[in-house]
């Protein structure tokens, strides 16, 4: 388990991290969300000892040291590989830094290239690959030594939906074999799909922390999804409806002033008859994210 | 790059060979004279380089025009005076001029004696000439030339190797600066071992180059020895060449190596402190400057290697790489002193490696906008 307790970091006058605490259990995926500059990369850099910090970070109960490096897989935010090398040379070089033997890694390369649908052979030069393919090779470098702790800084950025699915599958595979995984993302959809729990940072502070359900249930069920022949104008006149957002023809999302308004709206819409859809929910992660960011700006 | 000097050497030898070949046909001289006795005497006293088949002025002129002759000499006797007219395509070589002058003097002297009707005893008395004898201590002369050649060879060699590798190292490391690959590497291994590995790699590259030069130099030397036309030169300069080689292949090599390590370390440091990878070319500036200072500082002392500044600078790391080899060449330094200076350089290498290794990770991951100079001279927090 990776345990982060009360870490603090200051750059000059800027408080980059302030009393940040959370755990990542083995076999669990934690999503770290927050705006640019919220402190996500600084948290990762603290875990990896790239910077000094206040507080404690432990891995499997002891402070993280160079001895643990072989069990860490780290994907930095911007991608960067050694352009002069071939795919094979690059993968083997980085794997050997992780204490792997070339003879063990070499036979796996083709499988990994196929798994991530990399366009190119093991002999292709890194510089000849497209940006997306370079990113996939970098992912392979992060995963091939089967790390127990995976730290992925914005792994989904720049990936198309097909490739994002491949990455998602790879992360879930790593979770399956018991790796502790932490990744940052701007894309709430990815977080919703793969994370067991999430941590939201705002200007260095933890503002949300828990499982997806726990986080969402901290908010009232003010979002109402309905399918009805009613016109948007008519829906807007229902008591407690603040906003009507059309989704599809005949499908709407109603934003309520108060979760308790739901009961009266149900009565008015159905009159006790069958209705195809009536679902009252807390805000989506995306909305919560906006909400929390909005709080700071207010 | 490694083959550069060999290519240069090959080019120079090739050009020299080709130009000597093209000149070969035109070094002979013809001698023409209406007085056969004069011509015969000249031929008898100067048998080499004479084209003896040409006996008339028109034939000589034609041959000269066709470049088959370097020139021709017309010997005449008017009354009691001997006269020589030399027709050549360039001004007289001083050696040739002396030869002719010598011959003319002798011929004229014979004429004068005959004219004066001197007795053999009187002739002998007049032939009495003063004596000038040069007494050169051959060994010292050669040793000084050897020192001079060794001085220039070693100083230039050190300078070129230091500057070349310092800038390669600085640029190599600066180009890694701020790249995310460094984050991946530092999440895999310690900065110190990465730094030491990088420096070791560069040093092995330098060593390979030095070994190639030594082997190449040895091969050329052996080849030159086996060539008959170099034999005379080898005999003449045997002492000189072996002294120079001895001066290069002693503790001086160790100084060169240690100097390279020192300069490489500082180069790596200046590479690591540049603001961003794009500034890589600026990274080598401080170390290049240091190398140049050492190089030019030796100039005033090339004829005065016993001077006090030389002694002082032969202990100061970085400068000692230039100055101690010079003192060793001069032969005025004890082995003890050499080891003390070496130990100082080694200590500096260890301290520098330790210091830079410790700061390497922070330097490589940070991307602030301080200049190389600001970093080198400011105190770090």
Image (tube, rainbow, N blue to C red):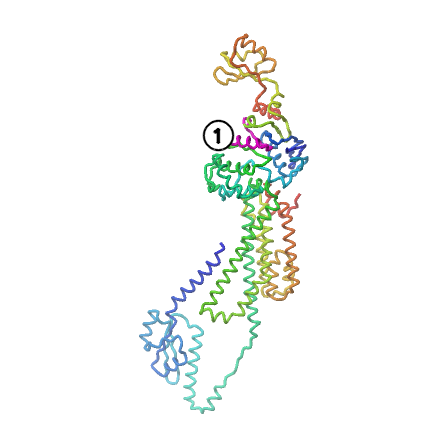
Horizontal placement of B187 versus B100: left or right?
right
Nearer to us in this view, A131 or A16: A131
Farthest-out residue, top? A271
Residue A281 rendering spot, x and y as whole percentages? 58, 18
Tell me which chain the residue with mark 1 is part of: A
Q: What residue is at 44 percent from the left and 60 percent from the top? A: B11
- Residue A253 seen by the camera: yes
Q: Quadrant of residue A256?
A: top right
Is residue A9 visible in the rendered image? The answer is no
Return the residue at label 1: A162
Front residue (pair A120, B66): A120
Asked whether B200 falls inside the magenta stretch, the response is no
Mark 1: few/some/many CA within 10 Å (<14, 14-19, 20+): few
- Residue B149 percent coordinates (x, y): 54, 65
Identity of the residue drawn at 61% across and 60% down? B323
Residue B6: percent from left, percent from top: 47, 59
Magenta region includes residue A179: yes
Secondary structure of residue under mark 1: helix
Above or below, comparing residue B138 to residue A49 in the picture: below
- Does residue A118 lie above or below B208 as drawn? above
Query: Which span of residues is magenta-colored?
Result: A164-189
């Amino acid at each position: 388990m990776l345990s982060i307790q009360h870490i603090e970091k200051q750059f000059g006058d800027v408080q980059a991290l302030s009393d940040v605490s959370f755990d990542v259990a083995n076999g669990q995926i934690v999503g770290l969300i927050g705006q640019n500059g919220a402190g996500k990369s600084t948290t990762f850099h603290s875990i990896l000892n790239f910077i000094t910090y206040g507080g404690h970070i432990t891995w499997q109960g002891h402070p993280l040291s160079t001895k643990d490096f072989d069990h860490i897989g780290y994907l930095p935010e911007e991608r960067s590989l050694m352009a002069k090398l071939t795919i094979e040379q690059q993968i083997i070089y980085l794997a050997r830094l992780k204490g792997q033997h070339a003879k063990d890694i070499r036979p796996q390369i083709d499988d990994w290239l196929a798994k991530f649908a990399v366009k190119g052979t093991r002999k292709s030069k890194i510089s000849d690959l497209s940006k997306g393919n370079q990113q996939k090779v970098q992912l392979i470098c992060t995963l091939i030594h089967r790390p127990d702790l995976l730290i992925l800084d914005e792994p989904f950025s720049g990936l198309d939906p097909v490739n994002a699915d491949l990455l998602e599958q790879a992360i879930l595979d790593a979770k399956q074999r018991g790796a502790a995984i932490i990744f940052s993302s701007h894309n709430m959809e990815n977080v919703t799909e793969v994370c067991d729990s999430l941590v939201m940072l705002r200007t260095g502070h933890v503002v949300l922390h828990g499982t997806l359900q726990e986080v969402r249930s901290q908010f009232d069920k003010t979002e109402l999804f309905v399918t009805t022949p009613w016109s948007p104008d008519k829906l807007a006149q229902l008591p407690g409806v603040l906003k009507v957002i059309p989704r599809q023809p005949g499908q709407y999302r109603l934003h309520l002033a108060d979760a308790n308004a739901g009961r009266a709206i149900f009565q008015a819409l159905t009159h006790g008859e069958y209705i195809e859809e009536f679902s009252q929910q807390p805000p989506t992660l995306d909305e919560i994210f906006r909400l929390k960011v909005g709080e700071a700006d207010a | 790059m490694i083959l550069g000097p060999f290519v240069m050497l090959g080019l120079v030898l090739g050009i020299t060979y080709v130009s000597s070949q093209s000149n070969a046909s035109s070094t002979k001289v013809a001698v023409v004279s209406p007085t056969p006795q004069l011509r015969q005497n000249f031929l008898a006293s100067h048998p080499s380089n004479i084209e003896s088949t040409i006996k008339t002025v028109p034939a000589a002129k034609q041959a000269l025009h066709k470049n088959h002759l370097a020139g021709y000499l017309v010997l005449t006797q008017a009354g009691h005076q001997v006269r020589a007219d030399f027709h050549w395509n360039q001004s007289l070589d001083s050696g040739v001029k002396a030869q002719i002058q010598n011959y003319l003097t002798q011929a004229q002297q014979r004429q004068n004696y005959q004219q004066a009707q001197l007795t053999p005893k009187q002739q002998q008395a007049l032939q009495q000439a003063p004596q000038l004898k040069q007494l050169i201590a051959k060994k010292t002369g050669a040793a000084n030339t050897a020192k001079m050649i060794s001085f220039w060879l070693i100083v230039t060699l050190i300078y070129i190797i230091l500057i070349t590798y310092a800038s390669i190292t600085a640029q190599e490391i600066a180009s890694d600066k701020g790249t995310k690959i460094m984050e991946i590497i530092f999440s895999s291994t310690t900065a110190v071992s990465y730094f030491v590995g990088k420096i070791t790699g560069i040093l092995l590259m330098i060593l390979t180059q030095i070994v190639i030069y030594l082997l190449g130099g040895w091969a050329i030397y052996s080849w030159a020895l086996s060539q008959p036309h170099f034999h005379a030169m080898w005999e003449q300069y045997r002492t000189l060449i072996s002294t120079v080689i001895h001066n290069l292949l002693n503790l001086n090599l160790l100084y060169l190596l240690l100097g390279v390590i020192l300069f490489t370390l500082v180069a790596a440091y200046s590479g690591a402190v540049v603001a961003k990878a794009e500034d890589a070319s600026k990274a080598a500036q401080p170390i290049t400057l240091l190398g140049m200072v050492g190089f030019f500082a030796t100039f005033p002392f090339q004829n005065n290697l016993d001077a006090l500044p030389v002694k002082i600078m032969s202990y100061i790391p970085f400068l000692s790489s230039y100055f101690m080899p010079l003192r060793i060449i001069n032969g005025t330094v004890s082995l003890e002193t050499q080891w003390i200076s070496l130990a100082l350089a080694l200590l500096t290498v260890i301290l520098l490696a330790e210091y830079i290794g410790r700061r390497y990770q922070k330097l490589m991951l940070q991307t602030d906008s301080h200049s190389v100079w600001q970093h080198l001279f400011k105190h770090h927090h």
